[in-house]
Amino acid sequence: MLIRVEIPIDAPGIDALLRRSFESDAEAKLVHDLREDGFLTLGLVATDDEGQVIGYVAFSPVDVQGEDLQWVGMAPLAVDEKYRGQGWHANWSMKDSIRLMSSAMPQW
């Protein structure tokens, strides 16, 4: 498994994973819109040995009571069904996200 920042070629795999992982397509549409509108702060993918997307987590700006505090929210988080229950998703989503976000955004 490889965890890395998403790249444009990952978009179809991310979309498919989100549509499989949630009851509606709202999360897939959210990520698409965030990406298209330039509001996706960071997207991380976990890929298997063949490069298929098996996990995804997105980070985007949030306002607190209408105030921009330079915070980001983490959502959605999705893990391919056959990889669920193995305990790695919580670890990679937080540790790697913080590490990758810090390296991608020096002001952090």
Image (cartoon, grey):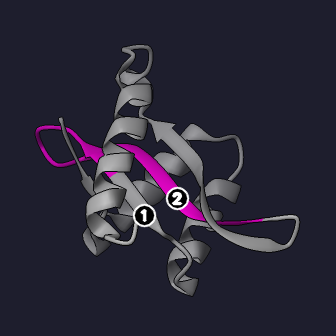
Secondary structure mostly seen in magenta is strand
Mark 2 or 1, nearer chain start: 1
- Considering every residue shown, the one lying at the far left of the view is 49
Q: Which residue is mark 2?
A: 59
State the residue at coordinates (35%, 37%): 95
Q: Which residue is mark 1?
A: 42
Query: Is 86 situated left or right of 37 in this image?
Result: left
> Where in the figure is residue 26, as x and y percent of width and height?
70, 57
Mark 2 Cα shell of 10 Å, populated few (<14), some (14-19), many (≥20): many
Query: Is 69 situated left or right of 89 in this image?
Result: right
**80 is higher (above) or lower (below) than 13:** above
Residue 48 within the segment the image draws in magenta: yes
Magenta stretch: give its range. Answer: 45-63
- Considering every residue shown, the one lying at the far front of the view is 107
Kindly state the secondary structure of the residue where label 2 is placed: strand
State the residue at coordinates (85%, 72%): 66
Residue 84 within the segment the image draws in magenta: no
Q: Amino acid at mark 2?
A: Phe
Specify the quadrant of the image occupied by residue 104. bottom left
Q: Which mark is residue 62?
A: none
> Where in the figure is residue 37, as x and y percent of width and height?
58, 85
Question: In the rendered view of the protein, which quadrant contains the C terminus?
Answer: bottom left
Question: In the rendered view of the protein, which quadrant contains the N terminus?
Answer: top left
Kindly state the secondary structure of the residue where label 1 is placed: strand
**20 is higher (above) or lower (below) than 86:** below
**CB atoms of marks 2 and 1 within 8 Å:** yes
CA distance separating discs 2 and 1: 5 Å
> Where in the figure is residue 87, as x and y percent of width and height?
39, 16
Mark 1 Cα shell of 10 Å, populated few (<14), some (14-19), many (≥20): many
Q: Amino acid at mark 1?
A: Leu
> Where in the figure is residue 61, as x and y percent of width and height?
62, 68
